Amino acid sequence: MKALQTLWVHARSGWNTNDLSHSQKTEYECLLGLFKEGGYEEAEAGARALAASPRRPWARGPVSGRVGRFLATGAAVAHGRGAEVKGELEALIKEMEPLTGSGRVSYLMARTFRVRILLQQGEYARAEADTEDLLQATNISAPQHPADTWPIQQAALVCLADAQCGQGRYTEAEAIARGNLPRADDFSATNLRTVLVRSLNGQVRFEEALAEARTFAPRPSVQATGALDIAVATALYGTGDRPQALQTAHRALAACEQHLHPIHPRISEARMLVNRITAGHPLP
């Protein structure tokens, strides 16, 4: 989310937002607020309206369209509908690739959306490869824009660890999480801690996983809804605390169904965990 919040700063110079009307700038800031609160459908609808709004007579580029499409695709991905906007996002990334300066940062952020789509679709090897390329590109831009690229680097590191967990490479994911937690901001720390708990679960170190989960207060985030509870429920079940595991898994499922789109893969993940614990089936 922090990466999206910094988009407005990047866009001012990289996308020449002086070509936006005052009302368009105000609308964009309102849409970012909706995104932060988890109002993804409203944010996407408003962003698409912004993308379709007419250019000012003196505009030098398709600024409102690009900014609107960027936020619209980002909202869809956060909501769990990445597959629906994958083609649109690919076209936007291609369009943004020639951008330089601060606009380059926005291009890198768009690439994090694409990695998230790959993770949502379970394409973990491709997500890992794309994330490694993204980190290399971010490192190149970092000297010119250190403050702006750092949130993207953190998001990419979370994606990398997620992709490694998806491929069963839990020790590598653990190393990434532990190595970057000390310098992570609040939002990234929540995501890295969740990945750390998942990686410990994958190594059958359930007690350690629970200890890690209890050492911090996660920052509220609609986009991360249910993720930590799913990991904690898995750890509880692994320790043999079936009643508490089932209660936590049900809580995760209810939260996911309330805040995420019905096709978000986390809903299926939570439901499968509830069914597994209810039936008393062993963890995979």
Image (cartoon, rainbow, N blue to C red):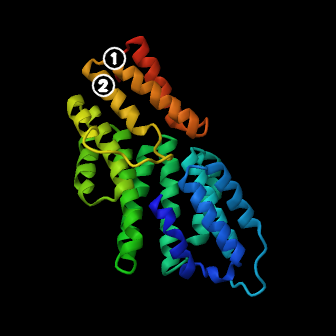
Graded by Cα atoms within 10 Å as few (under 14), some (14 to 19) or many (20 or more), the crowding at tag 1 reads some
Indicate left or right for 7 with 201 as reference. right
Q: Position of residue 153 (x, y in %)?
A: 37, 63
Give the amino acid type for the residue marked by disc 1 in the picture. Answer: Arg
* Residue wearing tag 1: 242
Horizontal side, residue 31 vs residue 209: left or right: right
| Residue 199 picture location, percent across and down | 29, 39
Residue furthest to the top: 279
| Local SS, label 1 | helix
The circle on residue 236 is 2
Q: Earlier in the sequence, mark 1 or mark 2?
A: 2
Question: Contact, CB < 8 Å: mark 1 with mark 2?
Answer: yes
**Element type at marker 2?**
helix
Q: Is residue 104 above or below residue 199?
A: below
Residue 30 in view of the camera: yes
**Residue 168: x percent and y percent?**
32, 37
